[in-house]
Each structure stands twice: as structure tokens, then as C-alpha cells.
Image (cartoon, rainbow, N blue to C red):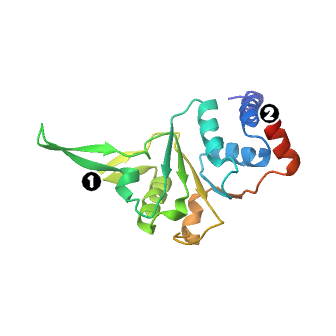
């Protein structure tokens, strides 16, 4: 692809996302760099900073499948990767793929899940494949994870170890929009 064509495509995507998610232009740039570089992105910010809206908007603008997992303390690795379910009609086990089998996955509040579940997702991010019920399945490209952490509450959370943060190309800290940006958001 010619560089000028790529630049125009990037500008068009940025403009389209910015029309919906306002006041987060540096974040949109980091997100696009992550997608184009085939990396993953970790967003740290309080609730209400358009993290989920941004992920949905990105998937819609570039026409990719979108999945979301709300990480909770009772989430198991199989809830993310997939599980073997027994089919009583055929008397066979059938692998049911989990939400990780998508183009863009929003791993919402990843620090709320137990370390085993975090590790399963981080391994899938690193290896671009999933092992579930003895089956190894590739994750089709593009596979992009946008994970979020809420830095406000730490009770009942499991911080990602520094050694696992390298799975993310960027770790972006967000804050609430300025007063002027909030007024613009309300007017639109």
C-alpha cells in the first residue's frame, strides 16, 4: 500500500472516530498505532471516559467483529477461551469457542479477574492461538485486544504483573475531559 493512501485511510478513520468520541484525540492516535502495528492496548482510566464507546466505534469504522468480556472475580479461563460441551444427542463433546475469537476484543476491567483468567488471555494475545480442551486453535488476524483497568478502586482486583504488561504495545492513562470538552460533548 502506498504511504499516501495509508495516510488518507488513517486520517479518515481518525476523523470518523473523533466525530463520536470527542476529547480523546491522543488516545485515538495511540489506538490506531496499536492496531496498525498489530499490538494490543491497555487503557487505565476512571469510568465514563468513553473506553467502551471507543472500542465499539473502532470496530464499526474499520468493519471488524467486536466482542466484549466484562472481567469479574468469578470469571474462569474457559469463559474467555471456550469450553468443551457435551452434546447429548450425538454423545460427543463439542468445543464451543469463547469471546476471544473475534477481531477486536474489549477486555473490560481486566484487573478484576483472577490471575489464571488474566494469564489465559495474555497467553492468547502473545501466541495468537488458544488451547482449550486439548485443542489448539489459531486466532485469525486481525486480533486486537483493548483492555481496560479502573485505577479508582483496588479492592477485589488483581494487578497485572509487570512481566505481563509487555503483552501491550501501549499502556495509556486516561482522565476525564476538560470542562470545555465536556461542554462540546453535551452540545453535540
60 relative to 180 in the view: left or right: left
Residue 176: percent from the left, percent from the top? 77, 54
Residue visible at 41% across and 52% down? 80
Q: Are marks 2 and 1 in contact (CB under 8 Å)?
A: no
Residue 85: percent from the left, percent from the top? 23, 47
Residue 155: give its label. none
Who is closer to the viewer here, 152 or 144?
152
Q: CA distance from mark 2 to mark 1?
A: 48 Å
* Number of other residues with Cα within 10 Å of mark 2, as a class: few under 14, some 14 to 19, many 20 or more: few
Quarter that holds the N terminus? top right
Quadrant of the image occupied by residue 101: top left
Please, what secondary structure does the residue beneath circle 2 have? loop
128 relative to 50 in the view: left or right: left
Residue 139: percent from the left, percent from the top? 43, 44
Who is closer to the viewer here, 38 or 96?
96
Who is closer to the viewer here, 32 or 149?
149
Number of residue marks: 2
* Number of other residues with Cα within 10 Å of mark 1, as a class: few under 14, some 14 to 19, many 20 or more: some
177 relative to 83 in the view: left or right: right
Residue visible at 46% across and 56% down? 121
Please, what secondary structure does the residue beneath circle 1 have? loop
Residue 188: give its label. 2
Residue 186: percent from the left, percent from the top? 79, 39
Is residue 73 shown above or below 69? below
Is residue 137 shown above or below 153? above
Quarter that holds the C terminus? top right
Residue 133: give its label. 1
Amino acid at each position: 500500500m502506498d504511504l499516501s493512501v495509508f495516510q488518507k485511510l488513517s486520517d479518515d478513520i481518525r476523523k470518523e472516530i473523533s466525530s463520536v468520541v470527542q476529547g480523546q484525540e491522543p488516545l485515538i492516535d495511540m489506538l490506531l498505532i496499536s492496531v496498525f502495528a498489530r499490538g494490543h492496548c491497555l487503557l487505565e482510566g476512571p469510568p465514563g471516559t468513553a473506553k467502551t464507546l471507543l472500542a465499539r466505534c473502532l470496530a464499526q469504522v474499520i468493519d471488524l467483529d467486536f466482542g466484549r468480556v466484562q472481567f469479574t472475580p468469578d470469571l474462569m479461563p474457559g469463559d474467555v477461551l471456550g469450553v468443551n460441551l457435551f452434546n447429548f444427542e450425538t454423545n460427543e463433546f463439542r468445543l464451543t469457542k469463547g469471546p476471544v475469537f473475534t477481531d477486536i476484543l474489549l477486555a473490560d476491567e481486566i484487573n478484576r479477574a483472577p490471575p489464571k483468567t488474566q494469564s489465559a488471555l495474555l497467553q492468547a494475545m502473545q501466541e495468537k492461538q488458544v488451547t482449550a480442551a486439548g485443542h489448539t486453535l489459531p486466532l485469525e488476524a486481525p486480533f486486537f485486544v483493548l483492555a481496560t483497568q479502573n485505577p479508582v478502586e483496588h479492592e477485589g482486583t488483581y494487578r497485572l504483573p509487570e512481566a505481563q504488561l509487555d503483552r501491550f504495545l501501549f499502556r495509556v492513562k486516561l482522565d476525564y475531559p476538560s470542562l470545555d470538552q465536556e461542554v462540546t460533548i453535551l452540545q453535540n
